[in-house]
Image (tube, grey):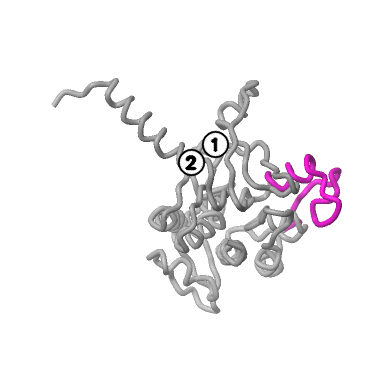
Amino acid sequence: MSIDDVVVTRIIFERFYKEFKNSFDIDVAIAGAGPAGLIAAQYLSKAGKKVIIFEKKLSIGGGMWGGGMTFPVIVVQEKSKHLLEEANIGVTDEGNKYYSADSIESITKLCSKAIDAGARIFNTISVEDVLIDKDKAVNGFVINWSSVVVAGLHVDPLAIRSKYCIDATGHNAEICNIVRKKCRPKKGPLSNPNKDLMEQSMNAEIGEKEVVENTKEVYPGLYVAGMSANAVYESQRMGPIFGGMLLSGKKAAELILKKL
């Protein structure tokens, strides 16, 4: 069989065009394909909702991908290990209610689980702004190719409308920072446009507990999950223990499903 280079190009373009054009008006848009974003997408999609994740990097996984200091191992607690087991991820009992897992296996299987549930992931796409409705609620993302953003090219973005959005961008809380600066909330955790959103130094015991507590709607239409939640509420970071991140993603999905 001969291979025609142009036929290959046509297949790629036409399939992407078909999938992308069906992503302009959805139920939930998620920024960030880390563990919290993937779990949120899985549970929302499993409930029959149309979900898209936009990941600015080429690879998915966020902080979980690299384990601890690139050692491909993560730790979770007893109350969250079922979220790994549901994805058929091997979990080892390390005693005292600590459980370890391979970070690469974990993120690839969480990704697969989200896709199998119906979620769609678009990588190398950055969220550079939010869409606002007539009531000033967030109802979508403004997106561009990450390469365009990095190069600083003056190329206008496109818009994706969604009923609800999730900021799962991690430590930088990128979407919340956009809303803080541009939408100028008069009350709530994003109300100070001059204050940087930043999590505090490491304390896993506090950070793991509060990342779940801090998972909530922070601005009309915008929910926060994972490390973005602790950055918004100035809680502690927690390093390569990921139980709270997984539970945060599930909680974000549950909160949105109540409204949908």
Q: Nearer the viewer, residue 120 or 232?
A: 120
Residue occupying the point 69% across, 62% down: 216
Res 193 seen here? yes
Q: Nearer the viewer, residue 18 or 114?
A: 18
Q: Nearer the viewer, residue 30 or 84?
A: 30
Res 172 seen here? no
On screen, residue 215 versus residue 20, left or right, reads right
Instruction: Answer whether labels 1 and 2 touch (C-beta < 8 Å).
Output: yes
The kind of secondary structure element at disc 2 is: strand
Residue numbers of the magenta segment: 174-201
| Dominant SS in magenta | loop
- Residue at label 2? 122
- Residue at label 1? 125
Q: Amino acid at mark 1?
A: Ile
The kind of secondary structure element at disc 1 is: strand
Q: Amino acid at mark 2?
A: Phe
What is the CA distance from the residue labelled 1 to the residue labelled 2? 7 Å
Percent coordinates x, y for residue 74 in the rendering: 51, 61
